[in-house]
Image (cartoon, helix red, strand yellow):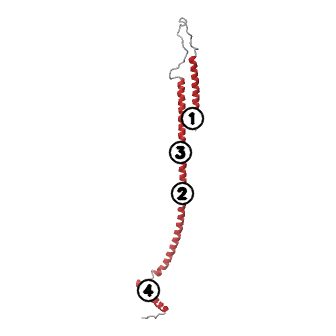
Amino acid sequence: EKNAQTAEDAKAAQVAVQQATAVLKDFYAKSAEATALAQTRQTPAEDAPETFDKPYQGLLPEGGSVVDFLEVILSDFARLQSETETSEAAEQDEFEKYMFDSKKDRALKENEKGHKEAKKQDKESELVSTEQELKLTQEQLDKAMAYYEKLKPTCVDSGITYEERVKRREEEIQSLQEALQILAGTDINLA
């Protein structure tokens, strides 16, 4: 907005300087032909003091007149306008590129955010499922340990030595074989 105002001001200043230059050039062109201050040729007797013999040109030194200064000012305003418009165009291009990159980056980050949120939900669901499974497994383990503790005195700590258990097992096997023979109807070999 500031650059646009500067460019507009430079255009208006160029027009004003061009008009002023035209007025001054017109004035100097007319003054070059003016003879208001010039005296006509006189005879030497009439011409006691030295006077003007050509039209008055004013003080027009070469390369330093008001018109020259105005032309320099005009070129400065034209350069200012050109630089401002070029700068504005470059900055606008840079801004548009930045906005495009920002929108693209934002879209990528929003997409990545969506993926991460979905992954987070999956992991939270998996965690809840695993915690429930762990709870059930722990309950089963606790029940099995309680049952083990209940059976332990009868199975492990019966107070009987290994040799006695082997002997009882052999007697039990023998009695089971005798029961099988009775059921099968074969003779019992009592020894």
Q: Quadrant of the C terminus?
A: bottom left
Disc assigned to residue 115 = 2
Instruction: Give the CA distance from mark 4 to mark 2.
Output: 66 Å
189 over 74 or under it: above or below: below
Name the N-terminal-most of marks 4 and 3. Answer: 3
Q: Residue 69, image x and y in percent? A: 53, 25
Residue under numbered circle 3: 97
In the displayed image of the protein, which residue is found farthest to the left?
163
Three-letter residue code for mark 1: Ala
How packed mark 4 is, by other alpha carbons closer than 10 Å (few <14, some 14-19, many 20 or more), is few
Q: Residue 1, image x and y in percent? A: 58, 38
Circle 4/circle 2 CB separation < 8 Å = no
Please tell me which residue is depicted at 44% across the width and 86% down the height of the picture: 169
SS class of the residue under badge 3? helix
How packed mark 1 is, by other alpha carbons closer than 10 Å (few <14, some 14-19, many 20 or more), is many
Name the N-terminal-most of marks 1 and 4. Answer: 1
Q: Nearer the viewer, mark 1 or mark 4?
A: 1
SS class of the residue under badge 4? helix
Three-letter residue code for mark 3: Lys
Q: Nearer the viewer, mark 3 or mark 2?
A: 3
Name the N-terminal-most of marks 4 and 2. Answer: 2
Three-letter residue code for mark 4: Arg
Circle 1/circle 4 CB separation < 8 Å = no
Residue under numbered circle 1: 7
Instruction: Give the CA distance from mark 3 to mark 2.
Output: 27 Å
Three-letter residue code for mark 2: His
How packed mark 2 is, by other alpha carbons closer than 10 Å (few <14, some 14-19, many 20 or more), is few
Circle 3/circle 2 CB separation < 8 Å = no
